[in-house]
Image: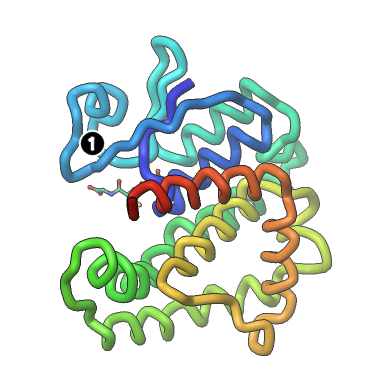
Amino acid sequence: MKIYGFPLSPFVRKVVVAAREKGVDYELIPANPSEPSEEFLKVSPFSKIPALSDGDFCLADSTAIVTYLDAKYPAPALLPAEPRARGRAVWFEEVADTVLIPAGAPIVVNRFLRPKIFGTDGDEEAAKAGEEAIRKPLAYLENEVGDGWLDGDFSIGDLAVACCIKTLSYAGWTIDPAHYPKLAAWYDRVRERKAWQAAADEEDAIFESMKG
Ligand SMILES: N[C@@H](CCC(=O)N[C@@H](CS)C(=O)NCC(=O)O)C(=O)O
């Protein structure tokens, strides 16, 4: 199985960690949406990362890919079977993908991508506006999370939110336990998962290799 993408993307990380949760072997193929190779465009027609090829089967979009992986490798389930739990898992994934990521993107763009990768100036005002914008979804999640996962067992919802928080950490943003104590403890629990740790090690190695 091949996963195309770059792990700074929370969407790519979601797929990588999901594969690892399920013990699926994969090869991570570097793909840059702005300079797509022909091979990548065959798998991802709109040049978005992540994309997946599994033999002759291709799929782009992290939600579609995790849904496929969950059906093909049911254990451990990332999309719970129980109707309400499944609805809530997808809901938290949506909060991450469509609320938290767009709100936090200016932080990553202006404090990490522009100054550290592209060598251009970041817009600090835009980054600060991003910090302001993520408060509402974070406060919501702080209110929802309990002593375990966002709802029931670890799910695609936990995975998506955690992937977003890890991408923010590249820009030096971390969850302040004074403001979000339950969310900070929850993120620590995510980081203790073997699949998460293995994916994080792989990610560190990729960034390390870029330096040298
Ligand atoms: N809904 C998609 C979003 C994927 C996405 O927007 N990926 C970004 C990288 S974080 C991308 O490929 N951007 C390039 C572009 O939009 O041209 C998913 O869940 O996979």
Residue 84 visible in image: no
Determine which quarter of the picture holds residue 186.
Answer: bottom right
Q: Residue at x 71, y 60 (%)?
A: 150
**108 relative to 92 in the view: left or right:** left
Determine crowd level at label 1: few under 14, some 14-19, many 20+ residues with C-alpha closer than 10 A.
few
**17 relative to 112 in the view: left or right:** right
**122 relative to 78 in the view: left or right:** left
Amino acid at circle 1: Phe
| Above/below status of 134 relative to 162 | below
Identify residue for label 1. 46
Chosen colour scheme: rainbow
Q: Secondary structure at mark 1?
A: loop
Most extreme residue toward the front is 212
Residue 91 visible in image: yes
| Above/below status of 37 relative to 152 | above
Determine which quarter of the picture holds residue 5.
Answer: top left
Compare residues 109 and 205 and report the one nearer the observer: 205
Q: Residue at x 52, y 45 (%)?
A: 14
Tally the marks.
1
Q: Residue 206: x and y, percent?
A: 42, 46
| Above/below status of 146 relative to 155 | below
Q: Residue at x 63, y 71 (%)?
A: 141
Q: Residue 53: x and y, percent?
A: 41, 21
Q: Is mark 1 within 8 Å of ligand 1?
A: yes
Compare residues 137 and 171 and report the one nearer the observer: 171
**147 relative to 54 in the view: left or right:** right
Q: Residue 95: x and y, percent?
A: 52, 61
Most extreme residue toward the top is 56
Q: Residue 75: x and y, percent?
A: 74, 29
